[in-house]
Amino acid sequence: MRLRASGAKSTPGGPQPSLAANYDSQQAPLPGRLFQPRAHALADVAPGTRRRGAAGKWPCLLDPAELRAREPEWRTEPAVGSGGGDGAGRAGMAAAAADSLGEAVALGSGRGRHVRPTLGSALPAPGPRGTCGELPPNPGVVLPTWLSCTKVSSLIERISDPKDLKKLLRTRNNVLVLYSKSEAAAESHLRLLSTVAQAVKGQGTICWVDCGDAESRKLCKKMKVDLSPKDKKVELFHYQDGAFHTEYNRAVTFKSIVAFLKDPKGPPLWEEDPGAKDVVHIDSEKDFRRLLKKEEKPLLMMFYAPWCSVCKRIMPHFQKAATQLRGHVVLAGMNVYPSEFENVKEEYNVRGYPTICYFEKGRFLFQYDNYGSTAEDIVEWLKNPQPPQPQVPETPWADEGGSVYHLTDEDFDQFVKEHSSVLVMFHAPWCGHCKKMKPEFENAAEVLHGEADSSGVLAAVDATVNKALAERFHISEFPTLKYFKNGEKYAVPALRTKKNFIEWMRNPEAPPPPEPTWEEQQTSVLHLVGDNFRETLKKKKHTLVMFYAPWCPHCKKVIPHFTATANVFKDDRKIACAAVDCVRDKNQDLCQQEAIKAYPTFHYYHYGKFAEKYDSDRTELGFTNFIRTLREGDHERLGKKKEEL
C-alpha cells in the first residue's frame, strides 16, 4: 500500500510516484542556507509550496516540536504493483516507509486503513552537510508540503570548535553569539537574527553555537554558558575587540538588536523604556506623515538624536507628561539624526537636538523651546500652547563699560605690548559658563584697577566676532583664559572666582605649555583646508571627512575615535581619514558649500566626489566597520573581474 497525506488523490493502476516527483522542480531556491543538524526534521519547504529534493535522497528534517504541533492524519491506500492488488511486498515496503517517519499506529484495518505518524523512531541517517540521507527503494511516500526546517542566513556562522570561535573573536571586533540548548530552542531566534545579519552586514558579526550538540558542548562550557535551568533555552553574548563585553538583555526585536550592534555601548532605544509606553515612537517619514494626516488630537513631537545629552535629560519628563495627557494630547518622539530624515529636518527647521514642535490637525504651529522643563511644565504649557516669546537682544559686554578691557583683532597685539601682565578671557555671548564667570571677572578687574601698584589688567575677547584671534590662539571652548607676560602667551589653570583671579595675578605661576591642538598633534588624520581639499580627496579612493569646530564638546568626544580609525588604515594607500576645521576662515566657504549645519558632520567621498553622509556609530568600531565594508566591496569586484578574465 502507498502512504499519503489525508486529502491526496490516489492513482490506482498508475505508476508509483517517487519522492522526488512530489516536489516542483521549478520552485525557486529559498533565501538563506539549509543546515542539516541531526536526524529529526523534514525538508526546507516553504508552507504551501513543493520543492524537488536531490534524486534518491531524503529531504532535510523538521524539528519534532513543530511536527507534533502540526501532526496531520495520514491514510494508506493499496499500492499498485505490476500485478495489481495489495501485495505483501508492497505492504511491507510501505510499512518500512512509515516506520522511517515514525511509529505506525493502526486506527483501523484493511483497505483505507488510517495510519498516523508519530515521533521517536529512528530515521535515515543524514547525508553530508547540504544533502540528505539515502531513500529506501521506491517508498512511494508523499510528504506534506507545509513541512519546513529553519532557514538560516548565510551571514550567520555556525561554530562548534573553540579554536574557530577564538579565531573569529580575534579577527572581528563586534560579535553577537547565540548559544542555544538545542536546535529547536534556537529556531525563532535564528529567524530573527537572519534578518538582523543582513541589516548589520559589514558592521557586526552574528554566530550560533548549539550547546545541545556533542561537538559544541565543550565550547559552551569553555565560554561559561549555563543553559541548565529549565526555563533558559538561549543566551545572547556580545564580544567586542576580542573579549566578552556584555550579555544582551534588551528587547529581542529586530530594531533593538540592530541598534545594539550598530552602537554596542550606546543607550537602549527610547521605546524600550517601560515608562515611555504612552509616547508614540515614529520610525520613518512615512509613519510621521501618516500620523499628521490622521491624528485629530493636538500633537507635540520631539525630534531627537539618541546621543544627545539634553534629549536624555528631558525624555523622562516628556514621557511622564505623555502618560498624564493620554487621550487628550499625543506626545511623540522621532530619531531624526540619520541622513534619511534631512527633508524633515529642513522642513521643521531642526538645527539642534532636541527640537520640539507643536501641531494641531496636522498643521505645524510653533516650537516648544523650554528644554529645561519638567513634566508639570509641559502639561501646563499644553493647556494653553503659545509661541515662544521673541528674545530681547542682549547688550554686548563691550558696551556695558567697567574695568575689563575689550580687545579686537586690530588692537590686541599693541595692547599686550603696552601692558606687561594681561589676563585675557576669550568668550562667546551665548555661552552660559561665560555669563556665570563674567561678574567675577568684572569684580576682580575693579580691584586690580584700583591698586596703586597694579599686578596687571584683565581683558576680554569676543571670539565669535574676532575670529582671527580665536583661530590664532586655538580657542576650542568657552570661556578660555590666556595669560600674557611681556607679550608671551601662557596657559592658565582653571580660574573661575574673583578671589582666584586676584590671587593668581598677584603671583602668577609658571604655567605649563599649552597642549597641542588636534591639528598640531602627530596623527594619521589629514587636516585639510579649502585650498587643498578637492585635490587631496581626488587621490584617495575612499575618504571619510570629519567637519568639526574645535570648541564643540561632541567633536572633542569623537576625535580620539576618529584618530584611532585613521591609524588603523594608515598603511592603506586608497583610504584616508580627513578633518576640516570649519571655524578657520579658510574653511568657512568650504563648509558652507558642503552644507555643514552641525558639528561634527561626517561625509564619505569617492575619489573626491561626495557619495553619502555617514550617520552611524561615532566610535572607532563604527568608523572601522564602515571603511572595511567599502574595502570588502572593492575586493569582491576585483575577484569578479579576475573570474571574467
Image: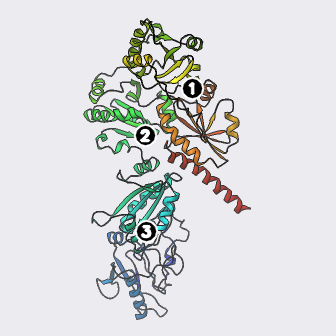
Type of amino acid at the residue the image marks with label 3 = Cys
Mark 3 nearby-residue class (10 Å; few <14, some 14–19, many ≥20): many
Q: Is residue 339 visible?
A: no
Give residue 644's position: percent from left, percent from top: 72, 61
Give the quadrant of the N terminus: bottom left
- Labels 2 and 3: the sequence-earlier one: 3
Give residue 130's position: percent from left, percent from top: 52, 73
Asked if 451 appears above or below 62 in the picture, the reply is: above
Query: Which secondary structure, mark 1?
Result: loop
Image-based side of 352 in relation to 224, left or right? right
- C-alpha separation, residue under disc 1 versus residue under disc 3: 59 Å
Q: Residue 323 sits in which quadrant?
A: top left
- Picture disc at residue 71: none
Q: Residue at x 47, y 75 (%)?
A: 59
- Labels 1 and 3: the sequence-earlier one: 3
Residue under pointer 3:
149
Residue under pointer 1:
583
Residue under pointer 2:
287
Q: Residue at x 27, y 65 (%)?
A: 229
